[in-house]
């Protein structure tokens, strides 16, 4: 559940970042450089947290399989 929630949050932040980046590319004055940088930082943070959670999940699965093989 945790990984799914983090993946959804990361996807939403990626979409928000892409949207702001697209607006900036089109020359819109509604998006400042600070807002764009903040959106990118939020996306990178979410991406990092999601990767860490997925790595923990994979290592836990490997540990469980190792224990099952031992039985």
Image: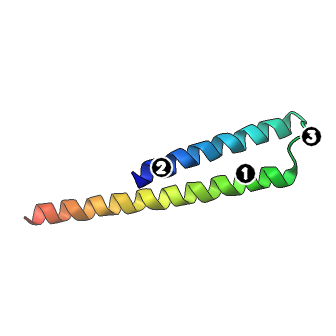
Q: Quadrant of residue 18?
A: top right
- Answer few, some or many: residues within 10 Å of disc 3's Cα (few below 14, many 20 plus, some between 14 and 19): few
- The percent position of residue 26, horizontal first and vertical second, equals 86, 33
Q: Residue at x 81, y 51 (%)?
A: 35
- The percent position of residue 66, horizontal first and vertical second, equals 19, 64
Under tag 2, what secondary structure? Answer: helix
Residue lying at the far left of the rendered structure: 71
- Indicate left or right for 55 with 11 as reference: left
- Answer few, some or many: residues within 10 Å of disc 1's Cα (few below 14, many 20 plus, some between 14 and 19): many
Q: Residue at x 64, y 56 (%)?
A: 44
- Reading the image, the residue beneath label 1 is 39
Disc on res. 5 = 2
- Indicate left or right for 7 with 34 as reference: left
Under tag 3, what secondary structure? Answer: loop
- Answer few, some or many: residues within 10 Å of disc 2's Cα (few below 14, many 20 plus, some between 14 and 19): few
Q: Earlier in the sequence, mark 2 or mark 3?
A: 2
Q: Quadrant of residue 65?
A: bottom left
- Reading the image, the residue beneath label 3 is 29
Dot 2 and dot 3 residues touching (CB under 8 Å): no
Q: Quadrant of residue 2?
A: bottom left
Q: Earlier in the sequence, mark 3 or mark 1?
A: 3
Under tag 1, what secondary structure? Answer: helix
Quarter of the picture containing the C terminus is bottom left
- The percent position of residue 7, horizontal first and vertical second, equals 50, 48
Q: Residue at x 78, y 36 (%)?
A: 22
Dot 3 and dot 1 residues touching (CB under 8 Å): no
- The answer to whether residue 20 is above or below residue 56 is above
Q: Nearer the viewer, mark 1 or mark 2?
A: 2
Residue lying at the far top of the rendered structure: 26
Distance of mark 3 from mark 1, alpha carbons?
A: 16 Å
- Indicate left or right for 38 with 47 as reference: right
- The answer to whether residue 71 is above or below residue 42 is below
């Amino acid at each position: 559940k945790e990984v799914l929630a983090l993946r959804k949050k990361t996807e939403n932040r990626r979409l928000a970042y892409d949207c702001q980046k697209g607006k900036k590319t089109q020359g819109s004055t509604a998006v400042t450089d600070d807002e764009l940088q903040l959106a990118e930082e939020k996306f990178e943070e979410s991406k990092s947290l999601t990767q860490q959670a997925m790595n923990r999940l994979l290592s836990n699965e490997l540990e469980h399989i190792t224990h099952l093989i031992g039985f």
